[in-house]
Amino acid sequence: MQTRSLGSTGPRVSALGLGTMGMSDLYGPADRAESIATIHAALEAGITLLDTGDFYGMGHNELLIHEALQGRNRDDVQISVKFGALRDADGGWLGNSGHPDFVKTSLAYTLQRLGTDHVDVYRPARVDPAVPIEETVGAIAEMVQAGHVRHIGLSEVGADTIRRAAAVHPISDVQIEYSLISRSLEAEILPTTRELGIGITAYGVLSRGLLSGHWSPDRELPPGDFRGYSPRFQGDNLQRNLELVEALRAVAEGKGASVAQIAIAWVLSRGEDVVPLVGARRRERLGEALGALDVTLDTADLDRIERAVPADAAAGDRYAAEQMAHLDSER
């Protein structure tokens, strides 16, 4: 397995990480046994970075990872945890909290659910507009000093917030959506992280399945699958975006690769400071994603990809308007 560093101060991790959200939440029902088998397959393939959130299934995802890691050496795996999203008993979203007391309480519950004494990277999922980022990061820094957190990360933050956070404590990485059809970070955020020696963990590299090459316009989504409300999966937007996928498929076929592998390989090509997270829920999809590590893209390939899927070619925002309003990265 190839490895990359999460910034100049963060851990060295596998070049691909496994995002586990879909094993517990937001993409409809998942098979528990297959989810655990997929985590095991990822570890056996050399993936060391597991990404979760304490609000994925209201703790279910952390318990799932705990179960999957039973009998394994904890130090062989880096666990990245997001916190701060507030939810109700029906799974609804109530906002975000970055209050120092909430930081410490959330971490205590996370450590219990994961069955570990430390989290490798701990990060607020979104910026709490009512709490200065300096206070949120300061509270995590106290947990670093106490030995309960190894590194501090951020998620979906803008350049100014990154600078303010980094002035309080070294930041290992910023987790943010990055794919062929989500490139807004390239304007200001990526130059800022590179200036400060901060890595990028890229989620949504397949745009929640849209760039997988397996999506069809007549696919029926189960209840609870948030893609049913995502602008890029609606009506004419979906049709336009699938046309981009077909253009990308022509490039992939020329390389003897799948659409998903080309899309992941493109994110890998963005720099050694970028670590893509693949959200595979099944071993079959994990195996396909791992194949991206064997795809080499030269300048001509990258030019063909750019012509197939130009920047800003996607139709529709990456989240619904209400969720976009919570993204400090989009302000």
Image (cartoon, grey):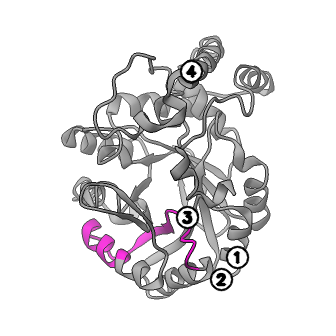
Up the image or down, 226 lies above or below 4; here it is above
Tell which circle, 4 or 1, labels the residue nearer the N-terminal end: 1
Element assignment for label 2: loop
Tell which circle, 4 or 2, labels the residue nearer the N-terminal end: 2
Do residues under tags 1 and 2 come within 8 Å of each other at their CB atoms? yes
Q: Which residue is mark 3?
A: 11
Element assignment for label 4: helix
Q: Which residue is mark 4?
A: 236
The C terminus lies in quadrant = bottom right
Q: Position of residue 231 (x, y in %)?
A: 53, 35
Residue 263 is marked as none
Tell which circle, 3 or 2, labels the residue nearer the N-terminal end: 3
For the point 65% across and 33% down, which residue is it?
180
| Closer to viewer: mark 3 or mark 2 | 2
Given the image, on which type of amino acid does mark 1 rest? Answer: Arg
Snapshot quadrant of residue 259:
top right
Q: CA distance from mark 1 to mark 2?
A: 7 Å
Q: Which residue is mark 2?
A: 168
Tell which circle, 1 or 3, labels the residue nearer the N-terminal end: 3
Instruction: Return the residue nearer the eye: 145 or 3.
Output: 145
Q: Which residues are magenta?
A: 106-131
73 falls in the magenta region: no
Q: Which residue is mark 1?
A: 164
| Closer to viewer: mark 1 or mark 3 | 1
Q: CA distance from mark 1 to mark 3?
A: 22 Å
Given the image, on which type of amino acid does mark 2 rest? Answer: Val
Q: CA distance from mark 4 to mark 1?
A: 40 Å
Q: Position of residue 200 (x, y in %)?
A: 63, 55
